[in-house]
Image (spheres, rainbow, N blue to C red):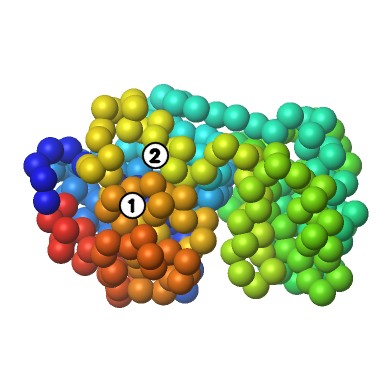
């Protein structure tokens, strides 16, 4: 490993955060702390909008956040970049979702927004319950036109019209297939890779000194971008061609193991 400061970027779900244990392993917390003491930078790089990183933010200290697949980038207390979907476009999106028989959540910097009606999709209700526990659900539903959001996620089933949905969104959004009928929709031109680029520019970090840690399809852009790519034990096969280091599952201390083997701690 070359000398000098590195910038480490960690996906949350399935990478830094165990979706089984609902926690960040102590080994990962300690490894990140040690890496930062060694002079390296540690960033969360997540598909979650900023409003959804609160629980993880309380579990582990990092130098900043790339949220909502690059739609908001924060270094320390400084917001390097932030964008929201124009309000008129947001109203169009809600109609597109419902017209094509999808349901889901609109993710914003301050809050998240669900339809007020009980969803016919159990997955949406489960997501709603989880977000309600974390206090991030807005009292406003989809009928109100008084808020902005950064990105959105939808669930589909056998009645959903994916072809029509994709055509209606057009080239303004990238639709990331997360599997199981779950789709993450991000404004075109934004990704986990663009978040990394903004951090690199801010700190003067070279690409060879960037390390990314991930497991799922919304990590693809940063795996294609970076030269040092750590792939978790449980992972989407789409990432395998770009991985430079295969580690263990998050529950098996995969983050700490990789950081030690790569000489970051």
What residue is disc 1 on?
Answer: 212
Using residue 212 as the reference point, say whether residue 263 is left or right of it: left
Answer few, some or many: residues within 10 Å of disc 2's Cα (few below 14, many 20 plus, some between 14 and 19). Answer: many
Using residue 106 as the reference point, say whether residue 225 is left or right of it: left
Relative height, residue 83 to residue 16 (above, below): above
| Residue 106 spot, x, y in % from top left | 71, 47
Q: What element does badge 1 sit on?
A: strand
| Residue 146 spot, x, y in % from top left | 80, 30
Q: Are marks 2 and 1 in contact (CB under 8 Å)?
A: yes
Q: What element does badge 2 sit on?
A: helix
**Of marks 2 and 1, which one's residue comes earlier in the chain?**
2
Looking at the image, which is closer to me, 168 or 92? 168
Looking at the image, which is closer to me, 143 or 151? 151
Answer few, some or many: residues within 10 Å of disc 1's Cα (few below 14, many 20 plus, some between 14 and 19). Answer: many
Using residue 123 as the reference point, say whether residue 259 is left or right of it: left
Viewer can see residue 78: yes
Using residue 97 as the reference point, say whether residue 253 is left or right of it: left
Q: Residue at x 82, y 30 (%)?
A: 88
Badge count: 2
Measure how far apart labels 2 and 1 are at the Cα level: 9 Å
| Residue 92 spot, x, y in % from top left | 84, 39
| Residue 72 spot, x, y in % from top left | 52, 35
Viewer can see residue 215: no
Q: Which quadrant of the view contains residue 121?
A: bottom right
Q: Check the picture and name the quadrant holding the C terminus.
A: bottom left
What residue is disc 2 on?
Answer: 196
Q: Residue at x 66, y 59 (%)?
A: 183
């Amino acid at each position: 490993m070359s000398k000098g400061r590195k910038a480490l970027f960690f996906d949350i779900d399935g990478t830094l955060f165990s979706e089984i244990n609902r926690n960040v392993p102590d080994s990962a917390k300690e490894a990140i702390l040690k890496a930062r003491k060694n002079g390296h930078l540690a960033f969360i790089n997540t598909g979650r909008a900023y409003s959804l990183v609160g629980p993880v933010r309380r579990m582990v200290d990092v130098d900043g956040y790339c949220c909502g697949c690059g739609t908001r980038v924060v270094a320390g207390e400084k917001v390097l970049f932030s964008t929201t979907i124009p309000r008129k476009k947001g109203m169009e999106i809600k109609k597109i979702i419902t017209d094509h028989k999808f349901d889901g959540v609109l993710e914003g910097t301050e809050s998240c927004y669900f339809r007020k009606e009980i969803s016919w999709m159990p997955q949406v209700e489960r997501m709603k319950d989880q977000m309600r526990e974390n206090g991030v659900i807005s009292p406003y539903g989809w009928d109100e036109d008084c808020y902005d959001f950064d990105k959105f996620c939808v669930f589909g089933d056998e009645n959903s019209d994916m072809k029509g949905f994709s055509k209606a969104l057009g080239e303004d959004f990238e639709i990331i297939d997360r599997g199981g009928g779950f789709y993450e929709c991000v404004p075109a031109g934004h990704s986990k890779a663009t978040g990394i680029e903004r951090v690199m520019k801010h700190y003067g970090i070279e690409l060879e000194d960037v390390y990314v840690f991930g497991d799922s399809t919304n990590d693809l852009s940063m795996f294609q971008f970076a030269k040092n790519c750590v792939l978790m034990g449980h992972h989407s096969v789409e990432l395998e061609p770009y991985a430079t280091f295969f580690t263990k599952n998050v529950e098996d201390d995969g983050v700490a193991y990789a950081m030690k083997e790569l000489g970051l701690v």
